[in-house]
Amino acid sequence: MNLNALGLVLAGLLFLAVPACADDKTTSATPPATGKETSMNEIMEKVRNFKGPEKLTIAELNEKAPFPLGEENTAYARYFVGKSYLAPVSTSQVSLYAVNFEPGCRNNWHIHKAEKGGGQVLIATAGRGYYQIWGQAAVEMRPGDVVHIPANVKHWHGAAPDTAFQHLAIEVPGEGTSNVWEEAVDPAEYAKLK
Ligand code: MN
């Protein structure tokens, strides 16, 4: 993974996000701003400085991952298999959360709907996980990998079966945004993943 490219992606997102928000009169799924700010330099530094291990329990992830474990994600638990945890990293411009999955935990198939803009950027930061777009093969995610999930595309993301996983999730601003949750990932298909 080219970390300079990651920096450009993050900088570009923030650059695009601010004007896009300015005249957005529609209701979006973005949580209200809490004023929590983390600079992109600080985030980049943390991603760059993380040196494994590749395989972690959720307790080890809590100790070693670049971002906090946060609170158990009870609000969305019915859309997940296994336990996940959420920590706000920055909420002052775009919504940026650390999402933490215990080994084997993944979310259901879902769609980040938008009439314009929208979608989600995932940045893997600890452990190992997967994302999958409907109709395509699952793709492994390792620390530093950046994944762009377009709006209106059915997908899931989560940990590998044998390790906890942390990714940052950036909600790309858009108009008419909402999240639609669908069925769980087929356990037999998930079981094929390494
Ligand atoms: Mn998603």
Image: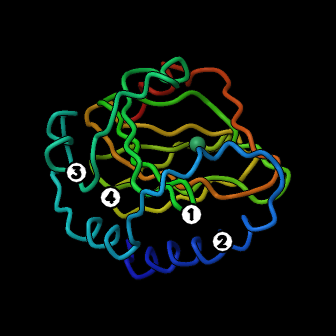
Q: Who's the residue at 57% across and 21% down the image? A: 184
Q: Residue 26: x, y in percent?
A: 83, 50
Q: Residue 16: x, y in percent?
A: 66, 74
Asked which secondary structure carries label 2, the reply is helix
Q: Distance between the Cα atoms at labels 3 and 1?
A: 24 Å
Q: Earlier in the sequence, mark 4 or mark 2?
A: 2
Q: Which residue is mark 3?
A: 65
Mark identifier at residue 143: 4
Residue type beneath disc 1: Gln
- Pointer 4 with pointer 3, Cβ within 8 A: no
Q: Who's the residue at 36% across and 64% down the image? A: 144
Q: Local crowd at mark 4 within 10 Å, few (<14), some, or many (≥20)? A: many
Residue type beneath disc 2: Val
In the rendered picture of this protein, how many numbered marks are placed on residues? 4
Asked which secondary structure carries label 1, the reply is loop
Which of 151/142 is in front? 151
Mark identifier at residue 93: 1
Residue type beneath disc 4: Pro
Q: Nearer the viewer, mark 3 or mark 1?
A: 1
Compared to residue 57, the image places residue 87 above or below, namely below
Q: Distance between the Cα atoms at labels 1 and 4?
A: 24 Å
Compared to residue 31, the image places residue 175 above or below, namely below
Q: Who's the residue at 73% across and 39% down the image? A: 178
Q: Which residue is mark 2?
A: 18
- Pointer 2 with pointer 1, Cβ within 8 A: yes
Q: Earlier in the sequence, mark 3 or mark 2?
A: 2
Q: Local crowd at mark 2 within 10 Å, few (<14), some, or many (≥20)? A: few
Q: Nearer the viewer, mark 4 or mark 2?
A: 2
Left or right of residue 14: residue 34: left
Q: Earlier in the sequence, mark 3 or mark 1?
A: 3
